[in-house]
Amino acid sequence: MKTKLTLNIDDKIVARAKRVSANRKTSLSSMVEEYLDRISKSNSNKKTKKSEPSLLERIRKYTYPVEISDEQIEKLKEKHLNEKYGL
């Protein structure tokens, strides 16, 4: 059974969410339902089992810091602009 839900959400957020739902070829209602289902399950799972690493912790596991000097950044920026605009 489905229940109708009324929400008050900022217009800009709704517009962005509608674009995302259109790109995914799904309804905004389905996206909200999926999100609420996911967070309600994860919240109940946290109470019953050891919590999983956060998204940031998982990303850090597969990444490493990159050291680059300001001079290298400027050279890369200049190269990009030359390729893009032919300067």
Image (cartoon, helix red, strand yellow):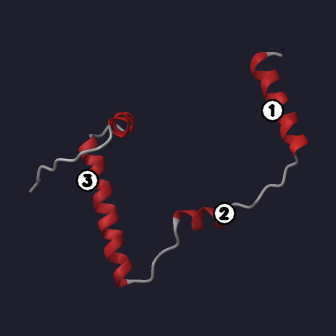
Which of these two is toward me, 3 or 14? 14
Quick check: 74 left or right of 38?
Answer: right
Q: What residue type is labelled 1?
A: Lys
Label 1: how many Cα within 10 Å (few below 14, some 14–19, many 20+): few
Is label 2 in contact with label 1 (beta carbons under 8 Å)?
no
Q: Position of residue 53 (x, y in %)?
A: 52, 72
Are the residues at dot 3 and dot 2 in contact (C-beta closer than 8 Å)? Answer: no
Q: Name the residue under label 2.
A: 62
Q: Give the quarter of the figure containing the C terminus.
A: top right
Residue 61 is situated, as x and y percent measured from the top left of the image, at 65, 67
Q: Outermost residue, left direction?
A: 1
Indicate which label's residue lies in the foreground, 2 or 1: 1
Q: Measured along the vertical axis of the image, is residue 56 above or below residue 86? A: below
User: Which numbered circle lies on residue 77?
Assistant: 1
Instruction: Specify whether 58 is left or right of 68.
Output: left
Element type where label 3 sits in the image:
helix
Q: Which mark is residue 33?
A: 3
Which amino acid, by three-letter code, is at mark 3? Glu
Q: In which quarter of the image is residue 79?
A: top right
21 in relation to 41, above or below: above
Task: Specify the quadrant that holds the N terminus.
Answer: bottom left
Marks 3 and 2, Cα distance to the nearest angstrom?
A: 30 Å
> Which residue is at a point 84% across and 40% down the rendered structure image?
73
Q: How far apart are marks 2 and 1 (CA)?
A: 26 Å
SS type, badge 2: helix
